[in-house]
Structures are given as structure tokens and as C-alpha cells.
Image (cartoon, rainbow, N blue to C red):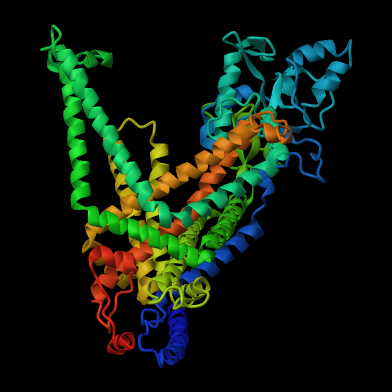
């Protein structure tokens, strides 16, 4: 039945695409009628990779169903609020624990038990309290003192079970029934849980200025025991955070800084956006100057290095013991010893001379390819200037990515919080056979477990269940991750194909900008979404599977960090390296395949094949253009983020006299400063990604132009005049144009 429905869906989709193709073909023919030269690159409309498109739509519908089911079964409160031993939330409104938002451990020393890492739960009673204890005390001391002063019991009672109000009960029975903790220690909340308030004084670890305490069982324990127990439980809660003494205070100050400086941060980001835009538009004039200035600067710097090494070599050569070589002195930890040898400077000089020769030879033999790369960079600046809307398309991509991330995060939280409370037997006895078995807290006291395992408890462990849905929660989480990666990569692919189509329409216009179609970005977006959703989804799926495998390998590597099997570690490292290379290769091929899809409208495999062989036929041009583009864009990002960062530094440190009094009072001036620098870099990165896509598209169009056209009247070159001049190519005029020129 499922196969039939999919086949029917494919037939329906193909019928719709064929109908649309015929309609658009008629429209294209009408547009070409009467024109002596009509670009046919964009007449090849057709739905591609229909099967993958249908599967992609089905997966999206299934993802929506998964999110709905997770929303029906999940409860985010289980993630937001800590849960006590009775499965009740701490701090939730309209519950008995509404004013008790912090979880308190009866005996935190039990958290040092190895079962914590197995069961993800500390084997001691846990209660919700309104505040953490602020003093050392034991139940024995409280019972001794409360008869003279009732305040001892009133304070200690808030850390006992809610229904317990009998301070005269024998201590042994109280500790057996877990009515009250045997001791309390000064604590402070961390992740809504009470942990000992550790302070290091003169290199000594203390709690409330004490290095030891009574454990309520007649023993004196060291504060180090508390640290080990707290460290074990924190590992379960937060992945190994060992201390957070002043985090709340620092966080409050950082929030205050953001609240008082957000307006100026926004101004800095707007400035970086304007500077990025101006930089891209000016590249048509400055690309060649910037590149050659840096290249000649590198040549000059290497030349100076050669001269300096020769001078050091000559000065050391005339001194005594100048014949000592590196092999004579062997390996030395103080590397300054090697600088006293003439042989060292000779090696440096030869190395720099080889580098200098390579740079000069590359520039001599590849000068035309460098000139082509610079001309394409300049043409890319012109294309962006003609289609300014492309600079703001990353906003759409950002919003779509934010939607994907939000949906994935919400679904993951609801999946993680699905199920009912599961209770398990917790016992400190190592030979208790009931440990870690499920139990019912309502009937646990009548069972024989308490008799066979004295001191055991039926405590809350986690949320789950025995249904089919609950048994496959982990698998559903993996599906959630894989579909999330697919959607993210599809969103990026849609943006790349849209931009490529817009810039390809610029290149294939014979007369620029007169022949550029109206609204090229919107038309390209419509073509990509209507005809090539399947191809984009196909490429995104291949990349997502590789990324998914890389995430699994990273997870395994994290789990095997303590393993001593060198062979396993080496094999895992090799796999990680191979899949990293594979991911970057697929990204490169997908990017060029999407450009070919936007030009010819073929399916993904055909476009990827055509792009690959086209690039292989022009591999040297690809290498030169790639490096020149990366270099100039990196220089631009560094220049923009650095200049805006310097301006922000002078502003927030009150070193600009004109607006000195406008600077807000800050606790940490580096908070808005780093925000401006990071935001400026990300804004420049977004603008330059559009520019890089433009250059890559123009480059592939340029290579196709060289192979498909010959400059004749029937097949003229579409490349700009600067590129034709570099390649000594000309467009021949038609006979009628020659007659008009003679008249």
C-alpha cells in the first residue's frame, strides 16, 4: 500500500511538472520570437529528481508528526524543574513545592557512589526546599539542643520530610526511615541543586572556614570527601563542571552591561554592515591593487629575510668555532643555541630563497590566470552592484535556519521529557540484588526489599515507560537529528541555488544591464523551489548522512577517551579524518552542482558530473581563483572586524573625547567589545558568502562560455570585455551590424 501511494504521488507530481514545463516552454518561445539572439540557458525548465522530492516531502510530514507526538507525550517541566525522590517538581506553580525551587540531598556523600554514573541518580533521599542550608549541623546535635531552644528544630525541620514533626523520635529510627538528613552543610544553589559552598583560602579547600565536619554517624570527615561527592553529581548534571562560585554574580553584571550598551552595540553592527557593503562595491576598483600590494609585500618581506640570514651567516662565519654543525651539538631544549651556528642561518637562507623562487615562478607562469581571477572578482563586484537584493538574501536563510533549529530543539526537549516517572531501588549495600530494579513507591514499604536490603529506598530515577514509543525514544532522537541536518543543508542549498541563478542571469545577459531579466533573485528562487526541490534535497541528504556519521564518530571518540586500546583510538582517528575530508569534498561538489542546476536545470547527478569534469579540465584556473578569492575575502573580514573592533575599543574605554560622556557605565567593557567584534565578523561573513557565491557562479559561466562559444555572430562570448582582452578573444559583428557601422 505504501509503495502504491508513493508511486501515485510520483505520477501526480510528474504530471504537474510536465504541464508546467509545456506552459513555460510556450512562454519562452513567445519571448524569443523576433529576437536575433535568445539565451536558451534558462529555457530548460523541468522538474528534477522527482522521487527524492516526494520522499523529502513525506519526511517533512513525518517530522511534523514526530514533533506532534513528542508534544503530546512530553513535558518540558521535567527538563526545566528538578524532581525530588517522589517524582514531584521543585518550584512548579500550583503545587505543594511552588515555593521550594531547589533540590536538597539528604546525604551528598552518597553521591560519590559509582552507581551515580550508572543510574544517573544519587542514591539518597532528595527533597525540594526553599533555600539551601547555611551552617554545619547534625541531627544528633539538633536533638540535644532543641529542648533548650526550639529554634534549632524549626531550622532543621525545613530539610526533613514534609509530614515529619517528631524531634523526639530516636536518632537510629529517623536515619533508618530517612525522615531527616543526618547532617547539613553550608551550601549554595547550582543548577537548582544544593551543593557545598567550597572556598579556597591560602591554597586550602574549606567550607564555611572549616576543613572537617561531623557526618551525623559519629565520624569526622574531610571537606575533600564533600568535594568528590559534589564533583561526581555535577558530572551527571552538567558534564564535569567543577566550580561555579561566582558565576551568578558575573552573569548578572554581564546582563547589566548588555542592558546599558545594547544601543551602541547595534550601532556598531550597522556600521560593520555598511562597511562590508562598501568594501564589496569597491572591490571592482581595489581588487587588483590589494592583491598585488600584498603579493609584492610578501616578496619584499621574504627578500629582506634572505638578506638578514645572509648577514647573520657572514658575521658568524668569521668567528672561531664557526665550523660547528647542528649534528655536532645534537638536540638542545634551548633553541637559542642553534641561532649561534652559521649552519642554521644558511639553512634559513636557502629555505627562504626557495620560497621566493617558487612565488616568482608561480607569478610568471600563472600571471594570466591571476589576472583572470582578479577580473572575475571585479566582475563579481559589478554583479552584486546590479543585483543588490542578493546581499539581503542571507536574512531569509538565517530565518529559515533559526526555524529549523528551534523546531529541532523543541522536539528534542519534548522527546527527552516523554514518559512517566520511573522509580528504582537505590541501596548503598553492594550485595543487594534488588538494586536498580523498578519499584512502586506506594507499596515499597510493605515489600520484603526493605528487610533484605536495610536502608534501601524506592526513589525517582528518570522519565520513561514500557510502550513501543518509549522503547524507541533514542531512535527517535537520532531521526530528529538526521532530519534536522537534512533541513539545514537543504536551506543552505536553496540559498546557494537561488543566488547562483540570479548571478547566472547577469552573466548570460549579452548587454548588461539591459538584458538582465526583471527581479532576477525572485525568479531564481521560484525556479529553484518549483523545479529543483528534489535535486537540492538529494544533495543535502548526501551531505547530511556524512555529517550524521561524523557526529556518531565524535560521540564514540568522547566515550573512548579513557580507553587504552591504541589500535581502536588510531582507527577512530583515521575514520574521523576521512569523513572530515569527505564532508568538505561533498560541500565543494554540491556547491558547484547547484550552480550547474541553476544554469541548465538538469538533475543533481548530471549537474555534479558536468561540474566535476568542467573543473577538472580547468584545474589550474580553479586553484588560482579559489586561493585569490579566499585570500581577499579573509583580508576583508579581518579588515572590517578589526577596524570596527578598534573603533568600539576606543569608544567603550572613553578614549574618544567628542562622545566621551555618551559612553554607558560598564562592569566589563570587553562584553560589548567582543560582541561587536564577533557580530561584525559574522555580518562580513554573511555579505562575503554572497560575493563568493557570485564569483564561483561567474567562474563556471566563464568556463562554459569558453567551451560553448567561439565569438562568432551566432555564438558570441558573454564574458565582459576585460576578460576577452586578457584571453585575446573578440566577438565578430553580424553582417547587418557591419552595414550599419559603414553607414
Q: Position of residue 446 (x, y in %)?
A: 70, 37
* Quadrant location of the C terminus in the rendered image: bottom left
Residue at point 37% right, 85% down? 38
Q: Which residue reaches farthest top?
A: 320
Q: Quadrant of residue 49?
A: bottom left
Residue at point 55% right, 57% down? 398
How many numbered circles are shown? 0
Q: Position of residue 741 (x, y in %)?
A: 32, 84
Asked if residue 362 lies left or right of residue 224, the reply is left
Q: Which residue reaches farthest front?
A: 743
Asked if residue 8 lies left or right of residue 649, the reply is left
Whether residue 97 can be seen here: yes
Whether residue 482 can be seen here: no
Q: Camera-side residue: 486 or 662?
A: 662
Residue at point 42% right, 38% down? 558
Q: Position of residue 5 (x, y in %)?
A: 47, 81
Asked if residue 87 lies left or right of residue 588, the reply is right
Q: Camera-side residue: 292 or 26?
A: 292
Q: Camera-side residue: 88 or 165?
A: 88
Q: Quadrant of residue 497?
A: bottom left
* Depicted 507 relative to depicted 275: above or below: below
* Depicted 239 relative to depicted 52: above or below: above
Residue at point 23% right, 16% down? 339
Q: Which residue reaches farthest left?
A: 323
* Depicted 191 relative to depicted 579: above or below: above
Amino acid at each position: 500500500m505504501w509503495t502504491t501511494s508513493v508511486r501515485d504521488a510520483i505520477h501526480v507530481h510528474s504530471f504537474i511538472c510536465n504541464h508546467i514545463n509545456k506552459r513555460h516552454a510556450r512562454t519562452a518561445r513567445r519571448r524569443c520570437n523576433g529576437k536575433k539572439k535568445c539565451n536558451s540557458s534558462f529555457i530548460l525548465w523541468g522538474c528534477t529528481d522527482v522521487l527524492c522530492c516526494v520522499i523529502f516531502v513525506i519526511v517533512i510530514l513525518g517530522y511534523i508528526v514526530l514533533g506532534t507526538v513528542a508534544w503530546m507525550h512530553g513535558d518540558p517541566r521535567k527538563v526545566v524543574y528538578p524532581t525530588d525522590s517522589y517524582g514531584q517538581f521543585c518550584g512548579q506553580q500550583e503545587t505543594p513545592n511552588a515555593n521550594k525551587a531547589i533540590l536538597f540531598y539528604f546525604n551528598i556523600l552518597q553521591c560519590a557512589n559509582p552507581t551515580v554514573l550508572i543510574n544517573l541518580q544519587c542514591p539518597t533521599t532528595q527533597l525540594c526546599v526553599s533555600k539551601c542550608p547555611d551552617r554545619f549541623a547534625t541531627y544528633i546535635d539538633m536533638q540535644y539542643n532543641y529542648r533548650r531552644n526550639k529554634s534549632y528544630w524549626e531550622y532543621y525541620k525545613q530539610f526533613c520530610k514534609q509530614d515529619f514533626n517528631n524531634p523526639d523520635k530516636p536518632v537510629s529510627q529517623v536515619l533508618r526511615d530517612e525522615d531527616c538528613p543526618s547532617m547539613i552543610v553550608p551550601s549554595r544553589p547550582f543548577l537548582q541543586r544544593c551543593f557545598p559552598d567550597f572556598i579556597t583560602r591560602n591554597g586550602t579547600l574549606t567550607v564555611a572556614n572549616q576543613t572537617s565536619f561531623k557526618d551525623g554517624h559519629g565520624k569526622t570527615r574531610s571537606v575533600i570527601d564533600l568535594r568528590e561527592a559534589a564533583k561526581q553529581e555535577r558530572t551527571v548534571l552538567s558534564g564535569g563542571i567543577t566550580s561555579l562560585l561566582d558565576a551568578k554574580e558575573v552573569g548578572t553584571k554581564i546582563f547589566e552591561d548588555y542592558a546599558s550598551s545594547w544601543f551602541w552595540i547595534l550601532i556598531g553592527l550597522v556600521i560593520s554592515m555598511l562597511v562590508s557593503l562598501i568594501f564589496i562595491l569597491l572591490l571592482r576598483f581595489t581588487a587588483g591593487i590589494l592583491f598585488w600590494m600584498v603579493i609584492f609585500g610578501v616578496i619584499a618581506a621574504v627578500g629582506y629575510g634572505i638578506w638578514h640570514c645572509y648577514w647573520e651567516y657572514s658575521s658568524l662565519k668569521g668567528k672561531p668555532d664557526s665550523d660547528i654543525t647542528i649534528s655536532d651539538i645534537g638536540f638542545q631544549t634551548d633553541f637559542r643555541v642553534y641561532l649561534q651556528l652559521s649552519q642554521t642561518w644558511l639553512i634559513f637562507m636557502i629555505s627562504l630563497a626557495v620560497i621566493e623562487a617558487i612565488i616568482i615562478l608561480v607569478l610568471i607562469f600563472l600571471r594570466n590566470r591571476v589576472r583572470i581571477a582578479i577580473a572575475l572578482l571585479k566582475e563579481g563586484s559589478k554583479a552584486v552592484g546590479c543585483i543588490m537584493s542578493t546581499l539581503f538574501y542571507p536574512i531569509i536563510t538565517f530565518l529559515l535556519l533559526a526555524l529549523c533549529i528551534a523546531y529541532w530543539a523543541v522536539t528534542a526537549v519534548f522527546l527527552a521529557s516523554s514518559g512517566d516517572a520511573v522509580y528504582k531501588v537505590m541501596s548503598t549495600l553492594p550485595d543487594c540484588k534488588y538494586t536498580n530494579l523498578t519499584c512502586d513507591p506506594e507499596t515499597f514499604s510493605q515489600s520484603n526489599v526493605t528487610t533484605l536490603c536495610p536502608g534501601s529506598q524506592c526513589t525517582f530515577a528518570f522519565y520513561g515507560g514500557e510502550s513501543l514509543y518509549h522503547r524507541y525514544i533514542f531512535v527517535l532522537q537520532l531521526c530528529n537529528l538526521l532530519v534536522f541536518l537534512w533541513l539545514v543543508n537543504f536551506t543552505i542549498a536553496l540559498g546557494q541555488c537561488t543566488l547562483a541563478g540570479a548571478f547566472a542571469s547577469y552573466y548570460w545577459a549579452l548587454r548588461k544591464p539591459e538584458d538582465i531579466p526583471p527581479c532576477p533573485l525572485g525568479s531564481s528562487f521560484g525556479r529553484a523551489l518549483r523545479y529543483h526541490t528534489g535535486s537540492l534535497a538529494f544533495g543535502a541528504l548526501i551531505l547530511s548522512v556524512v555529517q550524521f556519521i561524523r557526529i556518531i564518530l565524535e560521540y564514540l571518540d568522547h566515550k573512548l577517551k579513557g580507553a587504552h586500546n591504541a589500535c581502536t583510538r588510531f582507527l577512530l582517528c583515521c575514520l574521523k579524518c576521512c569523513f572530515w575530508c569527505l564532508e568538505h569534498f561533498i560541500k565543494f561538489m554540491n556547491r558547484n552542482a547547484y550552480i550547474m542546476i541553476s544554469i541548465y536545470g538538469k538533475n543533481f547527478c548530471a549537474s555534479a558530473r558536468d561540474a566535476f569534469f568542467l573543473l577538472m579540465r580547468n584545474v589550474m584556473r580553479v586553484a588560482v581563483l579559489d586561493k585569490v578569492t579566499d585570500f581577499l575575502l579573509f583580508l576583508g573580514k579581518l579588515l572590517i572586524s578589526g577596524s570596527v573592533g578598534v573603533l568600539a575599543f576606543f569608544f567603550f574605554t572613553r578614549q574618544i573625547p567628542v562622545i566621551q560622556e555618551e559612553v554607558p557605565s560598564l562592569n566589563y567593557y570587553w562584553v560589548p567589545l567582543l560582541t561587536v567584534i564577533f557580530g561584525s565578523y559574522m555580518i562580513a561573513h554573511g555579505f562575503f558568502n554572497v560575493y563568493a557565491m557570485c564569483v564561483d557562479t561567474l567562474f563556471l559561466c566563464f568556463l562554459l562560455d569558453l567551451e560553448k562559444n567561439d565569438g562568432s555572430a551566432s555564438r558570441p562570448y558573454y564574458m565582459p570585455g576585460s576578460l576577452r582582452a586578457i584571453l585575446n578573444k573578440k566577438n565578430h559583428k553580424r553582417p547587418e551590424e557591419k552595414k550599419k557601422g559603414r553607414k
